[in-house]
Image (tube, rainbow, N blue to C red):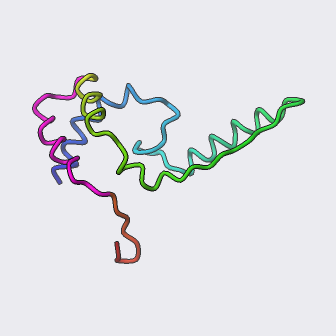
Amino acid sequence: MLEHFVSSWIKPKITPKLDEMQFGNRTGASTSHYLTSMLHYLLQGLDKPGHEATVIAVDFRKAFDLIDHTIAVKKLIDIGVQPELMPWICDFLSERKQRVKLNGGF
């Protein structure tokens, strides 16, 4: 529940700074939106004579574990997230692991 409140306090500061092509962790956006956008971009380019495309897929399933939390916290400070939230955010990020729940299992 607390995560929801903190998120609602931070989102107004972060949202204007996000790239419009960022689809992860955005309300109303999903990987389907990203794939549609990418396909549109590729097909638009391929409509031009002599153009071709190469797609490289990268597996980021462990990306969360590789994030440098020091850099993430510094960026939050730089964009003006309330200083009072920073100790909670740092604690939230420490010793975290990502997991997926599927069919009642993790």
Is residue 97 found left or right of 39 in the rendered image?
Answer: left
- Residue 81 is a magenta residue: yes
37 over 14 or under it: above or below: below
Quarter assignment of residue 18: top left
Q: Horizontal and vertical percent for residue 59?
A: 53, 53
Q: Nearer the viewer, residue 10 or 105?
A: 105
Q: Which residue ends up furthest to the bottom in the rendered image?
A: 104
Q: Nearer the viewer, residue 89 or 20?
A: 89
Q: Horizontal and vertical percent for residue 53?
A: 76, 39
- Give the mark count: 0
Q: Which residues are magenta?
A: 80-97
Is residue 53 found left or right of 90 in the rendered image?
Answer: right
Q: Horizontal and vertical percent for residue 9?
A: 21, 36
Identify the residue at image location x=15%, y=46%. 91
Q: Which residue ends up furthest to the right in the rendered image?
A: 49
Identify the residue at image location x=30%, y=32%. 71
Identify the residue at image location x=21%, y=53%. 95
Identify the residue at image location x=62%, y=40%. 37
Q: Quadrant of the N terminus?
A: bottom left
The majority secondary structure of the magenta stretch comes to: helix
